[in-house]
Amino acid sequence: YEFLLESKNKKIINFIDSASLGVSNVKTYSGKEEFQAYHIALLNRLPKNSTITIIGGLGNTWYAPMGDAYKEYDALRIKKNITWDMLMYEYGEEDKRLVQEYPSINNLSILSTSMQNMADININSDGTVLLQIFDPVPTVIEIKNQALADSYMRYYNDLMKHSKKFLG
């Protein structure tokens, strides 16, 4: 198998790329700066009135690596009317503020903490799925695959049946 990965043969390289979804369908962003830049770029890419569906929101764990870039993110999300449909394990003061000030774009629900881990899943309305890992370095793995996005939406809908609406 190693010899295939080291191959200079374009046909083999193309096969490996397509067999593993290819570099154009999976991208990784790691570290605070790339994490921030990715999320701002995502909002710029999504059309107005889009939805970001989140499974496993971690409250301050997500806000912390956003740092000062969160202010720009928040303003852009509000301006473009991009909704968060979020199932979360934990919440903080910012989540309370969002639900109270902008209830129409913040549909937040609470999951049992027995399921909590240091990762979450986002399903975006453009057919991309994000796997976000926060320990030890904030990392986004973006996968562009509509079938995967649809599968995770079914998972979200199943989990939603076992959640409780968060009212702040």
Image (spheres, rainbow, N blue to C red):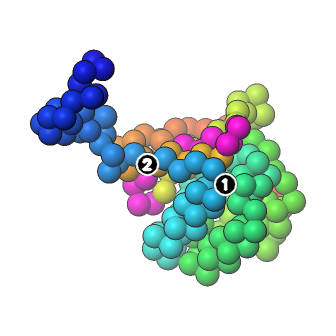
37 over 61 or under it: above or below: below
**Residue lying furthest top:** 1
Residue at 32%, 51% in the rendered image? 24
Residue 154, how many percent across, how many down? 47, 41
Q: Is residue 20 left or right of residue 120?
A: left
**Residue lying furthest right:** 93
Q: Which residues are magenta?
A: 125-137
Quadrant of the rendered structure where residue 69 is? bottom right
Instruction: Quadrant for the N terminus, please.
Output: top left
Q: Which residue is mark 2?
A: 27
Q: Secondary structure at mark 1?
A: helix
Assess whether residue 32 is covered by the magenta stretch: no
Front in this rendered view, residue 110 or 35: 35
Q: Earlier in the sequence, mark 2 or mark 1?
A: 2
Mark on residue 32?
Answer: 1
At label 1, which amino acid type do we have?
A: Lys
